[in-house]
């Protein structure tokens, strides 16, 4: 009898010990309809093209892999017959719907850019923008510039552009950017918004030929997070070729500001103060642990071949 009791206690101990190490979230069951956006390839070859089908399938599988890595349990659902570009996905333990939405809808496009963020160009841009009556009408305070020479405007006016963790693309933002785009007073200038908690700065990005960045997600080897003062930062490690490119970029741009963007939103913009030879770049914005882990997983998995958005949830 004692042996039986001991065996039962041992089994209970092993059960709880093993399950304590499984990072499983607790939440409700939700089914998501995910629509993949048209791009130039789809418009050129059509939805039934074999390459497009592979891109769609890979994007879907990457989304599932990201969710699984973050502790969500998923089940693939047979393709929605109404649309070749739509996929259905069941998630059994949704604990925060806005967080899950952001994981699904983040493409994971990573870029490093040169910028026009310096005093002289900021002054020229401010003069140009300040003389635009249409922009002046939209802004609730005078145009100002942050320490990194990004353009700042009143946050309250654009509060409706923000969700819990993601800025929504909508007509109002597109309209504002169309106004700013009239002031491309420098060569290869592109305006790009920033992701910060208390404001939405606009950065002046210098694009390369055909709008390309200096370095992108294709060179990412690994990602991780580091804790600093109860906040977390993301560290991106490049592969061998990316390490050499990053070293040259930091050498060529010593003393200048370099911007790091994800899905064309600036997450970090800092002055290069040394040549970096270890192939690492830190995204300096402070995150909570959950946000940092999610973004690290997204970047490590690579960008989705096709961007997507959620069309229904039930």
Image (spheres, grey):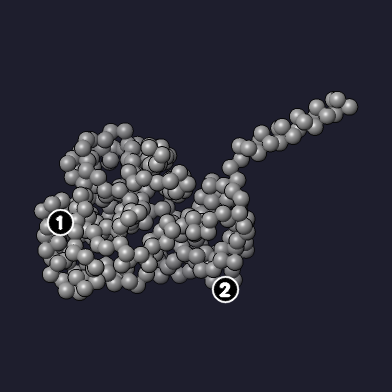
| Dot label at residue 282 | none
* Distance from the alpha carbon under mark 1 to that under mark 2: 50 Å
| Residue found 15% across the figure and 51% down from its top | 118
| 1 or 2: tag closer to the N-terminus | 2
* Image position, residue 119 (x, y; %): 13, 52
Q: Is residue 226 above or below residue 153?
A: above
Question: Which residue corresponds to mark 2?
Answer: 82
143, 102: nearer the viewer:
143
- In this view, which residue lies farthest toward the top? 2
Q: Is residue 109 above or below residue 280?
A: below
| Residue found 32% across the figure and 36% down from its top | 279
| Residue found 54% across the figure and 46% down from its top | 69
Question: Which residue corresponds to mark 1?
Answer: 122
26, 169: nearer the viewer:
26
Label 1: element kind:
helix
88, 30: nearer the viewer:
30
- Identify the image quadrant of residue 8: top right
| Image quadrant occupied by the C terminus | bottom right
* Image position, residue 109 (x, y; %): 38, 53
């Amino acid at each position: 009898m004692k042996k039986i009791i001991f065996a039962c206690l041992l089994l209970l101990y092993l059960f709880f010990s093993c399950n304590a190490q499984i990072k499983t979230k607790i939440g409700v069951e939700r089914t998501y309809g995910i629509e993949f956006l048209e791009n130039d390839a789809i418009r050129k070859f059509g939805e039934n093209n074999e390459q497009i089908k592979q891109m769609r399938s890979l994007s879907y599988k990457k989304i599932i892999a990201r969710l699984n890595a973050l502790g969500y349990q998923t089940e693939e659902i047979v393709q929605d017959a109404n649309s070749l570009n739509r996929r259905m996905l069941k998630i059994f333990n949704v604990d925060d719907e806005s967080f899950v939405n952001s994981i699904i809808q983040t493409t994971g496009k990573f870029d490093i850019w040169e910028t026009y963020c310096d005093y002289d160009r900021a002054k020229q841009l401010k003069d140009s923008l300040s003389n635009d009556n249409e922009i002046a009408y939209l802004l609730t305070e005078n145009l100002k510039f942050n320490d990194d020479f990004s353009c700042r405007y009143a946050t309250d006016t654009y509060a409706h552009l923000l969700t819990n963790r993601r800025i929504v693309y909508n007509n109002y933002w597109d309209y504002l950017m169309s106004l700013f785009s009239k002031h491309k007073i420098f060569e290869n200038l592109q305006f790009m918004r920033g992701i910060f908690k208390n404001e939405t700065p606009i950065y002046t990005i210098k694009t390369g030929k055909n709008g390309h960045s200096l370095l992108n997600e294709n060179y990412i080897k690994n990602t991780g997070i580091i804790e600093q003062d109860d906040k977390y930062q993301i560290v991106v490690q490049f592969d061998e070729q990316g390490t050499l490119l990053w070293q040259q970029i930091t050498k060529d741009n010593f003393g200048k500001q370099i911007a790091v963007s994800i899905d064309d939103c600036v997450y970090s913009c800092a002055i290069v103060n040394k040549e970096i030879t270890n192939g690492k770049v830190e995204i300096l914005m402070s995150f909570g642990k959950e946000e940092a882990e999610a973004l690290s997983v997204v970047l490590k998995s690579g960008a989705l071949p096709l961007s997507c958005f959620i069309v229904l949830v039930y």
